[in-house]
């Protein structure tokens, strides 16, 4: 009994630890803590690092050695495709051999840069294999099978360290905590084998096809062993070219320990932990700190960065679609055209799939090009190339080329965002800057490698030119601040690197070599600040001076005559009357047969209610509007959508969130004399005995009346701002378009008023619009006003009367299966919404006394949007000043 209790207590402790680890802040701090601990362990060695000496060591590497190191690094990355060939064979994936290799390269290089253990490639593999038509039912077990086996090879190398085959004795003796890390990694292998051979694994992962065979287990470990072995050999190859008297076993042992530390740190690419442990190990072997750091820099560059750049190119060409189409604006029957370059690339299945990853990769290629230009300008050029350039070109030309290449570098960094967003003008300017940048790369120091790289990126953009279809894209204040902060950090890094590297490099030049260009490092600060400021000035000028006439065509303004004529021939809804407020844009689709009224908030066009027009044209009209909006980087959202068109929105790929319900009274069934309306009858009798008078006036209304109503409205607002968008507000031109109900006391003083909104549905529906009263009016004033409106509407032959929208009504509730957003909405409904004295729950209880029927209203939004952010934008939209322009 006592042992069972102890077991339970231990289980609770484990659950507590797991629950703490699930906290994002804890997960984020864990790798930081590991890196900080490793830094504390190796701070003495880090103090010996001199950037100038490192650059000198890198410059001394011969070209043949560089080619050999790059070749072996690329081979090591290619070997990692064994993972994908393994799952292709084990799960019988119907994917070609060449496609499998491409998918493996893209996933593994991205994973190498952002996740040392291999788990970061899960999302990319899922995306790529789904592109090839692999069903989710097959792909999910394959990804689950692949993820845990990727460190089994490192676990096997850990056993080699324990048994003395790959010793790192000095490193483990000085840093004893690494012994526990090695043993922990070593024990992973037997656990992996046990799980692979278990019956539960056979049931859930192998889909009932029996236990994993020993051959598959061996192949799995073998694939991982190949990856880590080739990575270790690559590390040794680089070390052998930069260090003296390198011993394979010693270097491989240090690599194994450093790799284990990188895995445990969970930092992207194992950065920090891997490098510091490797530095500690190499310095313990007697190598100079600067040479050891040079090994790590080249290893990072050749094994991580260069293969990732190749992966970016593959991703940009692999994942994308020629033509002006994406998931948010697909039209049935639309087939993209293919240019000759894409047909030469010619990979099966490429043309019917689109993902933002392809454009993201193109954007990052441009960003990398800008960074390479800045890095090249920050570090000294090769001496013999500088001498050649000085003999051909005068010094002022070299200096101007240097400054302009820095400016182009910053411009490319800023334009990379426009490339990701598919902006055509960004493509044009980026292409021009890439060509000019390649020219300056040659004239500033004969850096033909950089020039070639820029031209290759320009060629890739040209091949993908038809994918840049957008006229513009929204730039938010937050995004501008983030990019300014990023470019400022880059400028500071450029300054620090330029000053420090040049000083260190000059100290170690051969005797008698004093080229004029290398001594001008004092201009680094001017170049950094000038490039940063001038690039932003040019960007701001480009954004503000570009023509906006096409964008203005999308945001059509209110044409009263056209709107009235249109509403005479279509069926409106309870929100249609608010279109006359003038705060919304109008998009006329399907040859002016369908109208979508909207307002803009940030990068969203929020359509009020359902589109108006022929129901058979609604789906095509929505697609037309979404395509037009997407040309400006905007997405379309439908606010207060009715159930009648949910199937259309669903076909468009929208998600739904219940905003609330509208209270609609059937006037045919409404009678004040009914027993269920007893409270309303008593209120009506009391006001009639007190001599209250109700007047219902038709438009146009007298100016004196509107002045009195303005006084009551201001008193009711009590300094609060008017709401807008889906709500009417006090606007004289708007009130002149509908009847107004006024309640007067015996002295003729107006106590309250309400405006009535027609439903534009052939005289079937009316809605209460503005409803405002003075302070200290008798109890039941609103009840009596509404009763009078109901009886008047019934006498005029109307069939329905809308009491308005009740936000978040019946959203979420107590359903345990409800989404967390719905549960939050339910809490807000019960406790929130106290504007003008009414909570949402209290508002619903008030409307219940009229015995209405409740009709749901929804928010329809694309899956690409997150609901919390969208909700904040909608609150901002409804709460902003009603006269706010629709295109802001």
Image: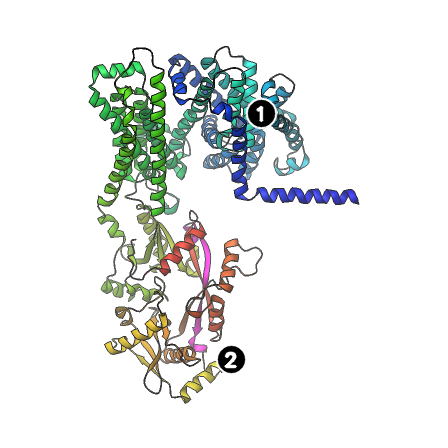
Along the line of sight, which residue is nearer the eye, 379 or 238?
379
Question: Which is more foreground, mark 1 or mark 2?
Answer: 1
Of label 1 and label 2, which has the lower sequence position?
Answer: 1
Q: Is residue 571 visible?
A: no
Coordinates of residue 128 in the picture (x, y in percent)? 46, 34
Residue at left offset 25%, top offset 78%: 704
Say left or right for 594 vs 289: left
Residue 155 location, quadrant: top right
Coordinates of residue 697 in the picture (x, y in percent)? 30, 79
User: Is residue 664 found inside the magenta-colored segment of the image?
Assistant: yes
Where is mark 2, residue-wise?
A: 676
| Quadrant (top left/top right/bottom left/bottom right) for the N terminus | top right
Where is mark 1, residue-wise?
A: 154
User: Is residue 234 found inside the magenta-colored segment of the image?
Assistant: no
Residue 773 location, quadrant: bottom left
> Is 674 situated above or below 611?
below
> Is 736 situated above or below 272?
below
Specify start and end residues of the magenta stretch as a single range. Answer: 648-669
């Amino acid at each position: 009994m006592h042992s069972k209790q102890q077991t339970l207590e231990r289980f609770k402790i484990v659950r507590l630890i797991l629950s703490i680890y699930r906290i994002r802040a804890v997960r984020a701090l864990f790798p930081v803590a590991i890196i900080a601990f490793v830094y504390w362990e190796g701070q003495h060695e880090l103090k010996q690092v001199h950037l100038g000496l490192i650059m000198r060591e890198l410059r001394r590497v011969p070209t043949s050695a560089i080619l050999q190191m790059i070749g072996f690094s690329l081979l090591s990355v290619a070997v990692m495709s064994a993972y994908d060939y393994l799952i292709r064979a084990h799960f019988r994936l119907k994917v070609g051999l060449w496609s499998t290799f491409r998918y493996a390269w893209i996933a593994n290089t991205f994973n190498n840069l952002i996740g040392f253990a291999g788990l970061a490639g899960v999302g990319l593999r899922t995306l790529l294999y789904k592109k090839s038509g692999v069903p989710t039912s097959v792909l999910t077990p394959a990804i689950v099978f692949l993820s845990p086996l990727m460190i089994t090879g490192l676990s096997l190398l850990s056993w080699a360290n324990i048994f003395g085959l790959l010793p790192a004795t000095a490193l483990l003796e000085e840093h004893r905590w690494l012994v526990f890390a090695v043993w922990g990694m070593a024990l992973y292998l037997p656990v992996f084998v046990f799980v692979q051979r278990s019956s539960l694994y056979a049931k859930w992962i192998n889909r009932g096809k029996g236990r994993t065979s020993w051959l598959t287990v061996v192949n799995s470990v073998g694939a991982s062993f190949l990856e880590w072995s080739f990575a270790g050999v690559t590390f040794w190859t680089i070390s052998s070219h930069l260090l003296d008297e390198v011993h394979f076993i010693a270097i491989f042992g240090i690599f194994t320990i450093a790799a284990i530390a990188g895995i445990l740190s969970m930092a992207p690419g194992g950065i920090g932990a891997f490098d510091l442990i490797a530095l500690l190990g190499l310095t313990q072997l007697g190598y100079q700190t600067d040479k050891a750091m040079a090994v790590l820099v080249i290893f990072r560059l050749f094994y991580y960065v260069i293969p990732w750049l190749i992966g970016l190119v593959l991703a940009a060409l692999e994942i994308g679609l020629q033509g002006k189409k994406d998931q948010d604006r697909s039209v049935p029957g639309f087939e993209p055209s293919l240019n000759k370059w894409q047909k030469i690339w010619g990979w099966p299945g490429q043309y019917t799939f689109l993902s933002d990853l392809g454009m993201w990769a193109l954007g990052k290629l441009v960003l990398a090009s800008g960074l390479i230009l800045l890095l090249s300008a920050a570090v000294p050029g090769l001496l013999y190339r500088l001498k050649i350039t000085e003999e051909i070109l005068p010094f002022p030309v070299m200096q101007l080329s240097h400054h302009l290449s820095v400016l182009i570098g910053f411009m490319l960094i800023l334009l990379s965002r426009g490339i990701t967003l598919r902006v055509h003008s960004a493509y044009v300017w980026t292409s021009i800057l890439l060509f000019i940048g390649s020219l300056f790369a040659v004239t500033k120091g004969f850096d033909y490698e950089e020039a070639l790289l820029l031209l290759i990126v320009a060629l890739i953009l040209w091949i993908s030119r038809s994918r840049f279809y957008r006229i513009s894209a929204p730039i938010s204040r937050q995004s501008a601040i983030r990019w300014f902060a990023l470019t400022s950090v880059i400028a500071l890094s450029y300054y620090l690197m330029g000053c420090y590297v040049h000083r260190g490099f000059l100290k170690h030049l051969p005797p008698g070599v004093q080229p004029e260009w290398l001594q001008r490092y004092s201009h680094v600060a001017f170049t950094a600040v000038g490039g940063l400021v001038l690039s932003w000035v040019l960007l701001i000028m480009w954004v503000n001076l570009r023509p906006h006439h096409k964008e203005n065509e999308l945001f059509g303004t209110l044409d009263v005559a056209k709107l009235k004529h249109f509403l005479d021939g279509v069926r409106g809804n309870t929100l249609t009357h608010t279109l006359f407020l003038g705060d919304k844009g109008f998009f006329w689709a399907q040859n002016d047969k369908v109208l979508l009224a909207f307002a803009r908030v940030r990068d969203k066009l929020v359509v009020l209610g359902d589109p108006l027009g022929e129901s058979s044209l609604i789906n095509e009209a929505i697609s037309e509007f979404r395509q037009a909006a997407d040309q400006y980087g905007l997405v379309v959202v439908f606010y207060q959508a009715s159930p009648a068109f949910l199937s259309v929105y669903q076909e468009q790929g929208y998600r739904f969130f219940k905003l609330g319900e509208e209270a609609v009274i059937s006037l045919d069934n409404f009678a004040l004399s009914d027993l269920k309306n007893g409270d309303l009858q008593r209120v009506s009798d009391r006001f009639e005995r007190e001599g209250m008078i109700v007047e219902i006036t038709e438009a146009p209304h007298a100016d004196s009346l509107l002045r009195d109503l303005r006084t009551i409205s201001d008193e009711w607002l009590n300094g609060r701002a008017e709401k807008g968008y889906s709500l009417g507000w006090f606007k004289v031109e708007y009130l002149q378009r509908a009847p107004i109900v006024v309640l007067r006391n015996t002295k003729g003083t107006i106590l309250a008023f309400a405006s009535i909104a027609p439903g534009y549905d052939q005289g079937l529906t009316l809605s209460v619009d503005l409803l405002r009263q003075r302070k200290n009016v008798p109890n039941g004033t609103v009840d009596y006003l509404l009763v009078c409106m109901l009886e008047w509407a019934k006498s005029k032959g109307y069939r329905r009367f809308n009491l308005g929208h009740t936000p978040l009504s019946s959203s979420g509730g107590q359903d345990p299966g409800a989404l967390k957003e719905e549960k939050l909405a339910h809490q807000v409904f019960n406790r929130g919404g106290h504007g003008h004295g009414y909570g949402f729950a209290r508002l619903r209880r008030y409307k219940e006394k009229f015995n209405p029927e409740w009709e749901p209203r929804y928010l329809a939004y694309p899956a690409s949007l997150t609901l919390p952010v969208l909700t904040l934008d909608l609150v901002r939209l409804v709460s902003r000043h009603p006269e706010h322009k629709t295109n802001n």
